Image (cartoon, rainbow, N blue to C red):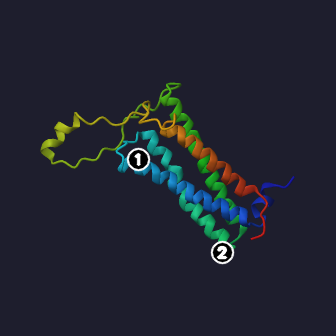
Amino acid sequence: MASTRNILTAPTGKIQTISAAVLLIGMAGTVGTALGFEHLAGFMPCKLCLEQRTPYYIGAPLMLGALISSQFKWPSFLTRLLLLAGALLMTYGLILAVYHTGVELKYWAGPADCSAAAVSFTQDAGSLLGSLNKIRPAACDEAAGYFMGLSFPGWNILASALFAIIGFYGTFAKSSKN
C-alpha cells in the first residue's frame, strides 16, 4: 500500500482541479448563504453559528489556492496539501455542526456564554438603553428556524460532510490526465 507521502506527491489532474473548484464554489456559497440569511433575512446567529463559519472563511481561500495550483501545474504536493487542509477544515466544521445540533436538540448543554452574539445598534445613545430590553441575542439551544425539517446546523452537517468527502477524495485519488 502506498504511503501518505507518496500519495501527496503523486501527480495531480482533473480530479484535483474539479475537487478544488467544487469545494471553492460550495464553501463560498454555503457561507454566503449563511451571511444572506443573517443580513438579508434577519436571522441572528448564535455564538456556535458564528463559529461554524470559520472553516468556510479559511477553506474557501485555500480552495482557491488549490484550484490555482492545480490549473498552473504547480507542485502536486501543494495542491493535494491544500485539498487535505480543506477536507480537515470541513471535518472540523462537521464536528461543530453535530455539537450544535445536539445542543439544539437538548442532548447536551451548550457553552455558558452561548447568548453572546454580536448586536448592532443604529439608534442614538438616548434610545439605546430602551432598546437593550427589547433585543435578545440568539441562544444556541434554540433553532432559528427549520427548513425542510432541518435547522441551520443540521444543514451544515450535510454540507460539511459532503465537502469533507470531496476534499479527501480529491486529496487521495489518483489523477486522471488533464
Q: Which of 121 and 23 is in front in this view?
A: 23
Q: Viewer-nearest of labels 2 and 1? A: 1
Amino acid carrying mark 2 in the image? Phe
Relative vertical location of residue 136 with respect to residue 73 in this rendering, above or below: above
Which residue is situated farthest in the left direction here?
Answer: 126
Q: Distance between the residues labelled 2 and 1?
A: 36 Å
Question: Can you tell which quarter of the image residue 81 is in?
Answer: bottom right
Residue that mark 2 sits on: 72
Amino acid carrying mark 1 in the image? Phe
Residue 18, x across and y down, in percent: 67, 62
State left or right for residue 142 relative to residue 84.
left
Relative vertical location of residue 116 with respect to residue 57 in this rendering, above or below: above
Which residue is situated farthest in the bottom direction here?
Answer: 72
Which residue is situated farthest in the front direction here?
Answer: 148
Residue that mark 1 sits on: 37
Q: Mark 2 or mark 1: which comes first in sequence?
A: 1
